[in-house]
Image (cartoon, helix red, strand yellow):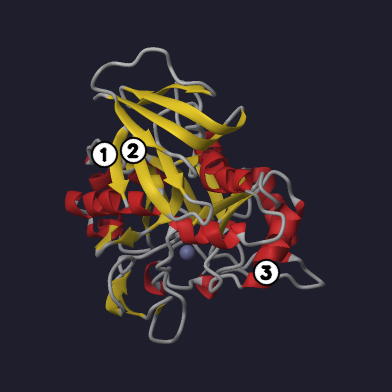
Amino acid sequence: MGTILISGAKIYAEEGVLEAGYVLVRDGEIADVSGSRPAELPDDTLEIDGTSLNLLPGFIDVHIHGADGADVMDATEEALDRMARFLPAEGTTAFLATTITQSHENIGSALENVAQYPNRPGQAEVLGVHLEGPFVEKKRAGAQPESYIIEPDAELFRKWQEMAGGRISVITMAPEHDRDGAFIRELSESGVVVSAGHTDTGFVGMQDAAKHGVSQVTHLCNAMPGIHHRDVGVVGAAFILDSLKAELIADGIHVEEQMLRLIWQNIGPERLILITDSMRAKGLPAGDYELGGQPVRVTEDRAELADGTLAGSILKMNEGARRMLGIEGVTMEDIVAMASRNPARQLGVDDRKGGIREGKDADLILADDNLNIRLTLCRGEVAFEA
Ligand SMILES: [Zn+2]
């Protein structure tokens, strides 16, 4: 692995913004961040001109099912490879392979596949698994196949975590199915982020869940009751309770524009985590696809089951980030927080991900002011070039 110098870009570094700085990359890591050009460089240094562009830390998508024809539930190395190769074009340099409610066998196969997956250079990194379901609420199933929804089962979870090689980092579950909080407590104490989603609980239920160890809300507003003036529900809990992070699908469809503004105004950059929740049709033409074994119709901007239920998205990380950047008051620093820093912190990988600082992985994006991605580095290797 060689040396790379990115020069002239506006650098959104952890210690502040450098108007036209230099980032030196060596052996896959950020070796130096500086306002001046390094005095000496190896002869074979690859120099990348970032003049008039922004240098951002790579995006981390903690909720993504598929892309480019592949789905995590395909349970093949090729499927994860396809995703890992495709995602740098939207600025994503790391992601959680996200499962869906399915039979024990199918979930088990997907987990074993992730456990065995060898992350490769020059591709986005699989950081672990987001287990979405099957411990969710049928009334709020959304596109989670209802027939496979079951009650929380600690023994089954332990078995799955073992099959996953300990790589399950996030679980989406309905906290009202764990009233005494024993399941939530066990998982959160073991280091798993417990995220409330596909849930029908109310504000009081969320308050209890947060006490038991729930620290996140899955795709805020979707597959949960909306804010009501007699029970502000899960959405209101995400507004009010500072201990909760909130995933957000900022495609303008899962959550419409004015609600995105309301969420921004009430939660802000410290607790929001931008996700795509995309399925396998992302990057492919409109047509007929599948999600969790169900037929899905994909048009130019959305993916739906036969009854019109949204079935994941075809959103790209830079598109969601661009939509948020269009909201009054949102800055590029806020985008870095919501798409890189917060997810890295939430997953406990902020020692090496989620920011531009010496010693961290060289997961970097060069993008224009409208978040068109020009170049992406994954752990110090060029993974995408426009
Ligand atoms: Zn979902």
Q: Specify the amino acid type for callout 1.
A: Gly
> Which quarter of the figure has residue 1?
top left
Question: What number is the disc on residue 378?
Answer: 2
- Please name the residue that numbered disc 1 is placed on: 122
- Kind of element beneath mark 2: strand
Question: What number is the disc on residue 259?
Answer: 3
> Which quarter of the figure has residue 10?
top right
| Discs 1, 2 touching: Cβ within 8 Å | yes
Q: Earlier in the sequence, mark 3 or mark 1?
A: 1
**Is 362 above or below relative to 325?**
above
Q: Is residue 176 visible?
A: no
Question: Which circle, 3 or 1, is nearer the viewer?
Answer: 1
The picture places residue 94, in percent across and down from the top left corner, at 39, 43
Of the pair 173 and 19, the residue shown nearer to us: 19
Q: How far apart, in angstroms, are the residues tagged by discs 1 and 2?
A: 5 Å
The picture places residue 200, in percent across and down from the top left corner, at 61, 68
Q: Circle 2: is it few (<14), some (14-19), or many (20+) Cα within 10 Å?
A: many
